[in-house]
Amino acid sequence: MASCAFGQLACLLFSPLAETSSILQGCLSKTDKKRNHFIFPWTYVLKTAAFFILIIMAWSPTQGATKYSLANFEEGDYLQKYLEFYIEGDGEHRSLEELINDQGVAFETQGSDQPRFPFSEQVHWGRLKIVNPLLETRTLVFESQYPPTQNLDIFLIHDSNVTHIQVGHWREKPPDTLSFRLPALPLSFKPGETTLYVKIKTKTSVRFDFRFWSKDEFLRHSNESNSMLFIWYGILVGLFFFNLFLASLNLDKGFVLYTFNIFFYALAQSYIYGVAAYYLPMSSSPWFSKVFLACFPISLIWSISFSRWFLKIPEM
């Protein structure tokens, strides 16, 4: 019965596509003898548009946030699909207590496995309910995968007890923070239900990219990630000095443009991947972060200049 109903629905939806093709061909040559104008098949166009709208709605993720059970924990679990969000209005500065006690505050899901928000100085809140069905406390590494977040507050609420942790580029690292280019720290979850609140206040785009790891697996993951970045930056550094050497031998405009392009591109990438914040302590200041963000448009300008020079080279 279900397959029959699905077949009927498919025929109903796909029929406009087949009909529209033939009818459009007929209407292109069909004119009104009295008014001599083109007769457009609005009915079939609307059916076709409705078909595509239904397809888009069917493929778009609409799942709601559910509780995250530690019984189903897997290494590197992404937490985005379990999160609910609330964005403060202009001029709002809510504390956690005000947020919880205000009945008018409604957390909503974004309907995406990768929730991202545009550039904003508004405070963004995320809420995640975690269930530990075990009889003992479970400790996992909480990793934030978006380094440009300058101010990140983490609240753990269990049986009315609140644990507050502050991390981010513009803050001192907590004592138990793991040594890594991304914010990562161990969080303990007692038996029962724990509510995790995440508060993000930043001057860049906002992303809630969080993962859970066991400590041993996180160390392996961080070592592999750092090794890949060392190879990547080794290539960039090699290209930079190679082109700098060529520019010193021949002060051609192309070598100079390409050298500056690599330099500013590497600086911009170091900010995005958290390398600058990890190896350069001064990058924690607001003005230094703005300098690194400015490397993106500067790198783009040098890249466009090099491309313009390259396209003007006469053929050999």
Image (tube, rainbow, N blue to C red):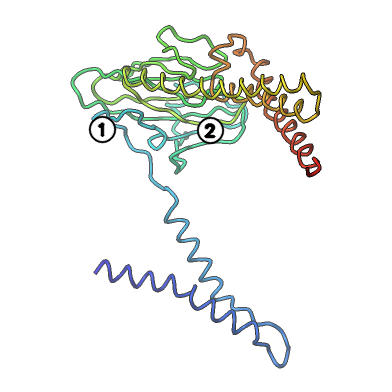
Tell which residue pokes out farthest to the left in this image.
135
Q: Amino acid at mark 2?
A: Ile
According to the picture, the residue beneath numbered tag 1 turns out to be 72
Using residue 170 as the reference point, say whether residue 214 is left or right of it: left
Of the 4 image quadrants, the one containing the C terminus is top right
Tell which residue pokes out farthest to the top in this image.
175
**Label annotation for residue 51:** none
How far separated are the C-alphas under marks 2 and 1?
Answer: 29 Å
For the point 49% across and 17% down, the residue is 181
According to the picture, the residue beneath numbered tag 2 turns out to be 87
Using residue 224 as the reference point, say whether residue 206 is left or right of it: right
For the point 48% across and 29% down, the residue is 125
For the point 64% across and 24% down, the residue is 239
Residue 279's spot in the image, x, y percent?
A: 55, 11
Comparing 11 with 227, the one in front is: 227
Q: Are there few (<14), some (14-19), or many (20+) residues within 10 Å of tag 2? A: some
Using residue 290 as the reference point, say whether residue 42 is left or right of it: left
The earlier-in-sequence mark between 2 and 1 is 1
Q: Amino acid at mark 1?
A: Asn
Residue 250's spot in the image, x, y percent?
A: 79, 23
For the point 28% across and 30% down, the residue is 73
Which image quadrant is residue 108 in?
A: top left
Q: Is residue 9 above or below residue 85?
A: below
Kindly state the secondary structure of the residue where label 1 is placed: helix
Residue 6's spot in the image, x, y percent?
A: 32, 67
Q: Is residue 183 above or below residue 99?
A: above
Residue 77's spot in the image, x, y percent?
A: 35, 31
Comparing 182 with 133, the one in front is: 182
